[in-house]
Image (cartoon, grey):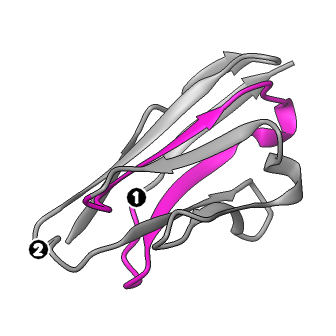
Amino acid sequence: VQLVESGGGLVQTGGSLRLSCTASGSVSRVNVNGWFRQAPGKERELVAAIGRGGSTYYAEFAKDRFTISRDNAKTRLSLQMNSLKPEDTAIYYCASEEGYWGQGTQVTVSS
């Protein structure tokens, strides 16, 4: 199973980005369900997650700005990020319930 993120980039403060994560390979039992991020010198942290039934969880910093969504097959995960701030600069990773991780996509927010 491989998870591949896309959609990162450079954006100005207040801008938006939409991250996508697609699972490939033996995905019949894969449930891609979370976005994490890691800023330089900091530990990786959970950004948002989505449960099997569609319930969502957001870290405090992501509430009201980020939206997580997933397709019905549970193999494609998205993260809509609005009102971005310089402190959102990090590498963003998607992950699956089974422990698979993507390689990450860089998000840089300029002030």
Residue drawn 84% across and 31% down?
86
Range of residues picked out in magenta: 73-102
Residue drawn 78% across and 40% down?
88
Could you say which quadrant of the image residue 23 lies in? bottom left
Task: Let me know if residue 37 is in the magenta part.
Answer: no
- Badge 1 crowding class, 10 Å Cα cut-off, few under 14, some 14 to 19, many 20 or more, is some
Q: Earlier in the sequence, mark 2 or mark 1?
A: 2
Residue type indicated by callout 2: Ser
Residue behind mark 2: 26
* Image location of residue 85, percent across then percent down: 84, 30
- Badge 2 crowding class, 10 Å Cα cut-off, few under 14, some 14 to 19, many 20 or more, is few
* Image location of residue 72, percent across then percent down: 30, 56
Residue drawn 35% across and 72% down?
31
76 in relation to 34, above or below: above
Quick check: marks 2 and 1 in contact, CB under 8 Å? Answer: no
Residue drawn 37% across and 85% down?
98
Disc number for residue 103: 1
* Image location of residue 5, percent across then percent down: 39, 47
Q: CA distance from mark 2 to mark 1?
A: 18 Å
Relative to residue 55, is residue 70 drawn left or right? left
Residue type indicated by callout 1: Gln
Q: Nearer the viewer, residue 54 or 102?
A: 54
* Numbered disc 1: secondary structure: loop
| Quarter of the image with the N terminus in it | bottom left
96 in relation to 62, above or below: below
* Numbered disc 2: secondary structure: loop
43 in relation to 92, above or below: below
Q: How many marks?
A: 2
